[in-house]
Image (tube, grey):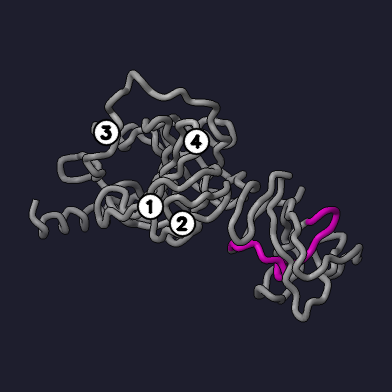
Amino acid sequence: MDTTTLKQVRSAFALVSVALFAFGFTPACVATADGEEEYAGDEPWEGGEDEEGRGAQAEVGAAPNFQLPFPCGQAWLGQTRTNHSPQLAVDFNRSGDEGDTVVAAASGRVSRVENLGNTSYGRWIEINHGNGYTTRYAHLSSQSVYVGQQVLRGQKIGTVGNTGGSYGAHLHYEQRRNGYTQTVRFNGAAAHYWGYKTYTSNNCSSGGGDGGGDTSGGFSARVDTPSGVALTIRSGPGTGYKAIGSVADGARVTIRCQQVGSRVTGTFGTTTLWDKIGTGYVSDAYVYTGKDGRVAPDCP
């Protein structure tokens, strides 16, 4: 296919994508003129090095407790379909998602950071979680990790994009065992096959980087107030609630949950979001999490 014809095909798929999205369908990986999805020919599901030795796979231990590859509390529409390549992958989408944060679904070491241009995965990342398990994150607009880097679950690794064989911004996500795609699982439950399902992220702990979770079941962050003054802890999510204590500037805190309350302007701008730490609440305007918006579920 010459360059002009290829551009015409891509333009046609772009128009179809817009129409599908208007009717509630999510963007996905682009198909070529002969109906094959545009992935590189050396990928394992099309044969190649990972196909060798199928009968002599390494012993694999228990799988990690994979979580959604998005920050805690976010809701994403996942799509699975029988003509996907590979079939067990999940495409994630939500309105205006290009540039949204993608996080590690489980802790591990970054094994690949690739850029295939306008074909296949485009910009993509693979994380090795040990015991034969890996995850892949494709069509990214940016990558913020490097090969060999140790990452923690919930740590930002890149942003949602529209690169490679894709029409419309979305995240193509896979879970693999010994190089072969597996049924995707989140928080111990299998993904929905086949069709659409909305998932809410429980990727709320074991994060890392500039602000991240901890193993005690919350999201670790840092208090940052002007002039080093202590931050007031209140009994509820607002300045009208009773002061029940304080936390020092620079202290690490664990955000258990978050709730909308009174509007506060502080170190990190203006927000109505309040973070529950211990038995009380502090304004998110003075708490550095390293992420935009919510990092924990709603408080009960």
Q: Earlier in the sequence, mark 3 or mark 1?
A: 3
Q: Residues within 10 Å of mark 2 (few under 14, many from 20)?
A: some
In the image, is residue 250 above or below residue 21? Answer: below
Determine the CA span between mark 4 and mark 3. 19 Å
- SS state under label 4: strand
The residue labelled by disc 2 is: 145
Dot 4 amino acid type: Gly
- SS state under label 1: strand
Residue visible at 56% across and 41% down in the picture: 67
Q: Quick check: 18 left or right of 127? A: left
Residue visible at 34% across and 55% down in the picture: 123
The residue labelled by disc 1 is: 113
Residue 26, visible in the rendered structure: no
Dot 1 amino acid type: Val
Q: Position of residue 228 (x, y in %)?
A: 79, 77
Dot 3 amino acid type: Glu
Q: Residues within 10 Å of mark 1 (few under 14, many from 20)?
A: some
Q: Say whether residue 282 is magenta.
A: yes
Q: Say whether residue 195 is magenta.
A: no
Dot 2 amino acid type: Val
Q: Position of residue 11 (x, y in %)?
A: 21, 58
Report the number of numbered marks. Answer: 4
Q: Residues within 10 Å of mark 4 (few under 14, many from 20)?
A: some
Tell me, for residue 130, which label it has, or none: 4
The residue labelled by disc 3 is: 49
Query: Camera-side residue: 198 or 101?
Result: 101
Q: Position of residue 93 (x, y in %)?
A: 44, 50
Determine the CA span between mark 2 and mark 3. 25 Å
Determine the CA span between mark 3 and mark 1. 19 Å
Mark 1 and mark 2 residues within 8 Å of each other at the beta carbon: yes
Q: Earlier in the sequence, mark 2 or mark 3?
A: 3
